Amino acid sequence: AQKITQTQPGMFVQEKEAVTLDCTYDTSDPSYGLFWYKQPSSGEMIFLIYQGSYDQQNATEGRYSLNFQKARKSANLVISASHLGDSAMYFCAMREPGGKLIFGQGTELSVKP
Amino acid sequence: GAVVSQHPSRVICKSGTSVKIECRSLDFQATTMFWYRQFPKKSLMLMATSNEGSKATYEQGVEKDKFLINHASLTLSTLTVTSAHPEDSSFYICSARDGTSGRANNEQFFGPGTRLTVL
């Protein structure tokens, strides 16, 4: 069975510093997709970044980058130059065949001024 | 990007009543929609997969008769919580998959969610 694990319930980071949010996954399917979403207190799910299992390079989207280590089955999110608006819940997710997403437990990020 | 709406955004109802939540894809055709449930500070749990014109596929442990899902058109799916009880209070989020454009990456778009409170 496919599984996504986020082991950090909460993280603190100083404003303007970088932070890494951990995510590991388990699947026997050779083709899969990994996603990171941000969920502020309003509840909306904001897509941040995507990594396909066959992508050769790590995905980047502005201040977000995904540290994809296929052999270790990890897909950590790196946020550079944090700012106060980055404070939110962050979810890692994996797409199963058929399109449904399974989510990790989430990490609550707090950015300190 | 594609837009998915949900209505209502917030609903408070009495125990025993039924509540309908709508999920609409506004600028694309959604062949598949997904319904998730989320408790405070917890992860999103998939409840069911809704395919246009066919019966929904429910995840293990989700009561089909309790959570009725209808996907009557390519732009609308509805979730009806029947005979709601306080334990059904939760945040319900839908997502829609664009089945026509061939997007491979972020092809699933989330609605803003509906907060249900059952008194």
Image: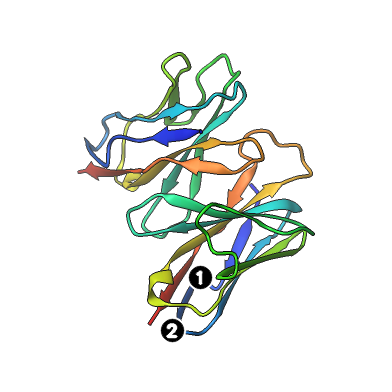
Q: Are marks 2 and 1 on the same chain?
A: yes
Work out whether A60 lies above or below A37: above
| Quarter of the figure with residue A66 | top left
Percent x, y of residue B51: 72, 54
- Colour scheme in use: rainbow
Percent x, y of residue A94: 52, 35
* Tag 2 and tag 1, C-beta contact below 8 Å: no
User: What kind of element bears circle 2?
Assistant: loop
Mark 2 belongs to chain:
B
Q: Which residue is mark 2?
A: B15
* Amino acid bearing label 2: Ser
Q: Which residue is mark 1?
A: B9
Q: Within 10 Å of the Cα at label 1, are there few (<14), some (14-19), or many (20+) other Cα atoms?
A: some
| Quadrant into which the C terminus of chain A falls | top left
Q: Which mark, by number, is residue B114? A: none
Q: Residue at x 36, y 43 (%)?
A: A106
Q: Within 10 Å of the Cα at label 2, are there few (<14), some (14-19), or many (20+) other Cα atoms?
A: some
Q: Residue at x 36, y 57 (%)?
A: A41
Q: Which numbered disc, 2 or 1, marks the residue that appears first in the sequence?
A: 1
* Amino acid bearing label 1: Ser
Q: Is residue A44 left or right of residue B21?
A: left
Q: How many marks?
A: 2
Can residue B89 be seen here? no
